[in-house]
Amino acid sequence: MFLIGTAGGLAASAASALLLTAIILFSILMTFAATKLLSVTLLKGVPSSFTLELPPFRRPQVGRVIVRSIFDRTMFVLGRAAAVAIPAGMLLWVLANVMVGGDSLLHHCAAFLDPFARLMGLDGVILIAFILGFPANEIVIPIILMGYLAEGGLCEAGSLLEMRDLFVANGWTWATAVSVILFFLLHWPCSTTLLTIKKETGSWKWTALAAALPTVIGVLLCMGFTALVRCFS
């Protein structure tokens, strides 16, 4: 909407593909950088090894595969997601519908976070949307729309042109869009991912590190990018 435009066509599609590829490559680069950082700090001197065990090859049993996929994988993930999503949804409803002094609690929280969010090139509504989007990153944009439109529930996104007009009316620029992209790439993982990390590592410390490391890097990158833009604007 801000870097490519809202018009269609072959050129816009190619530009969108190139932009997405650049974002993916940047995220891979940041993964390598974080790995290097850990290898010279917390994991310094810890030998790394990779062991691959090949199971015996057998003819797949379709029924067993389906049952294991549904109950051992899908239901397990959905159960963990629901354990966080249900209370988070209740919290979001309360914040959006309980009014204090003529404004919702969501508005008050966004106003409180706004000064810090401005340092990152965002605003309070965007930052509170990221926080409330902890159960699933897919609801961040609907929460932003809800905050801007002062609705009491999650909003469906309209056309790209309508969304762009709404964002521009609330102070978005191309720099805001870049900061949002950077923070989308680098912030705490969603609840299901963190629960999986806790299950695999058996440690709350590693889980906390998995949330803190990308978030700190994302905040610093957004602040650095915003400061750079302001120096040349």
Image: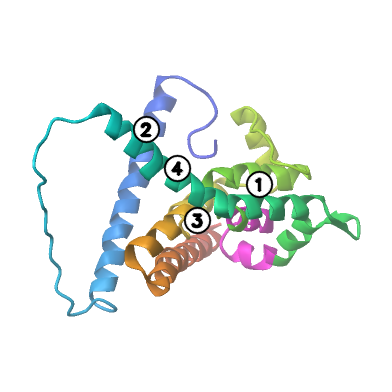
Residue 74: image quadrant is top left
Q: Which label sits on residue 17?
A: 2
Measured as percent of width and height from the top left, residue 164 is found at: 63, 36
Observer-side mark, 3 or 1, equals: 3
| Residues tagged 3 and 4 counted as in contact (Cβ below 8 A) | no
**SS for callout 1:** helix
Query: Alpha-carbon distance for marks 3 and 1?
Result: 19 Å
Q: Is residue 52 left or right of residue 141?
A: left
Q: Is residue 192 visible?
A: yes
Q: Earlier in the sequence, mark 2 or mark 4?
A: 2
Q: Which residue is mark 1?
A: 144
Q: Is residue 152 magenta?
A: no
Q: Is residue 19 above or below residue 133?
A: above
Q: Is residue 88 left or right of residue 74?
A: right
**SS for callout 4:** helix
| Residues tagged 3 and 2 counted as in contact (Cβ below 8 A) | no
Q: Amino acid at mark 4?
A: Met
Measured as percent of width and height from the top left, residue 84 is found at: 57, 54
Q: Is residue 126 magenta?
A: yes
Q: Is residue 186 visible?
A: no
Q: Which residue is mark 4?
A: 75
Query: Alpha-carbon distance for marks 3 and 2?
Result: 29 Å
Q: Amino acid at mark 2?
A: Ala
Q: How many marks?
A: 4
Q: Amino acid at mark 1?
A: Ile
Q: Which residue is mark 3?
A: 191
10 Å crowding of disc 2: few (<14), some (14-19), many (20+)? few
